Image (cartoon, rainbow, N blue to C red):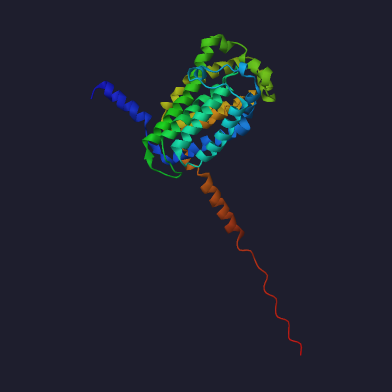
Amino acid sequence: MSTSRRIGAAVSGWLTEPVPLGRVAAFRTLVYLFVAADLLVFTPWIRDKASIPGELYQPLFVGRLLPLPTPTPLLVNLIFWALLLLALAAATGRAPRALGWAVFVLYFEWMVIAMSYGKVDHDRFGFLVALAVLPTVGRARHRDRTESEAAGWALRITQIAVVCTYFLAAWAKLRFGGLEWMTGSVLARAIIRRGTELADLIAQVPYLLIAAQFGIIAFELLSPLVFVVPPRWRQAVVAFFYSFHVVTVATITISFAPHLVAMTSFLPLERLRPVERLRRLTRRRGQDAGPVPTEPPAAPSPAVP
């Protein structure tokens, strides 16, 4: 076999490394439940776009390419309710292809509406990729230990998108801000705008914010190393990714919720089994309580002569 074929086979094997179907089933449930939570909790402001005049709508490139319609109250509310109901239905695992593709198309349009008024969030990239690849897997049941290349491919592509979010963010910082991004006052301005009391304490330490900016660039540029570290260290690297976002929320209150959901593609979610553990806990509590004592029957009263 030639060198190019060996490399191609190695890359193909890495992209389709089999994983249990139970893992993608758990990931799918989490992703679709987050779609519902996103509509109701994290970004309910997107529905407000229905009341914005159509001339203020400046669609993203993909919105001009397709082209997608200008948002109207009817369109926005129709997408909202259809997406909410379909996402909840998809979370059950039924009709994974039909419901999965429907949720992806509607959520994609929902994001185009959200990001076509001057601000584009990059924390949705990995999540959108997850929605796009999940329908390709087909049926997958919780607790199913069957190894599947299709499930492995879907999770691997999502993982690549998650890492690209970090790496390309560093590239954008250096492309538009130059090396001065690391030595400037980026974090200082963020703390002034939306910082917490913890951030105020950190800002008082000389040069700590500058060091943090160097650390952010280094972390984002080195994020692809998660794919080459030994498997026993990979979960520790992913834990560091999550800790980075914990600090971000605790200091400048920026949430990357959809990105964090997509990042669970690195985790062995099939081991969690929350429903099964809840059943065991309920059963155990019932056994600990024991049978409810009943009062003995009253003795019959003596007959009166």
| Quadrant showing the C terminus | bottom right
Residue 95, above or below 80: below
Q: Quadrant of residue 52?
A: top right
Q: Is residue 138 visible?
A: yes
Image position, residue 31 (x, y; %)? 52, 34
Q: Nearer the viewer, residue 250 or 303?
A: 303
Seen in the picture, residue 89 relative to 11 is either above or below; the reply is below
Q: Residue furthest right?
A: 305
The image shows residue 179, relative to residue 86, as above or below, that is above
233 with respect to 73 (left or right): left
Q: Is residue 91 left or right of residue 290?
A: left
Q: Residue at x 55, y 48 (%)?
A: 278
Place of residue 204 in the rendered image (x, y in percent of width and height, measured from the top left): 68, 18
- The quadrant holding residue 255 is top right
Q: Nearer the viewer, residue 200 or 101?
A: 101
Residue 253 can be seen in this image: no
Residue 55 at x, y percent in the picture: 62, 16
Give the residue displayed 63% in from the left and 33% down from the top. 41
Q: Could you tell me which quadrant the N terminus lies in?
A: top left
Looking at the image, which residue sits at the far bottom? 305
The residue at 40%/34% (across/down) is 152
Residue drawn at x 49%, y 33% is 102
Looking at the image, residue 293 lies above or below residue 297? above
Count the numbered circles shown.
Answer: 0
Q: Quadrant of residue 290?
A: bottom right
Q: Position of residue 104 (x, y in %)?
A: 49, 30
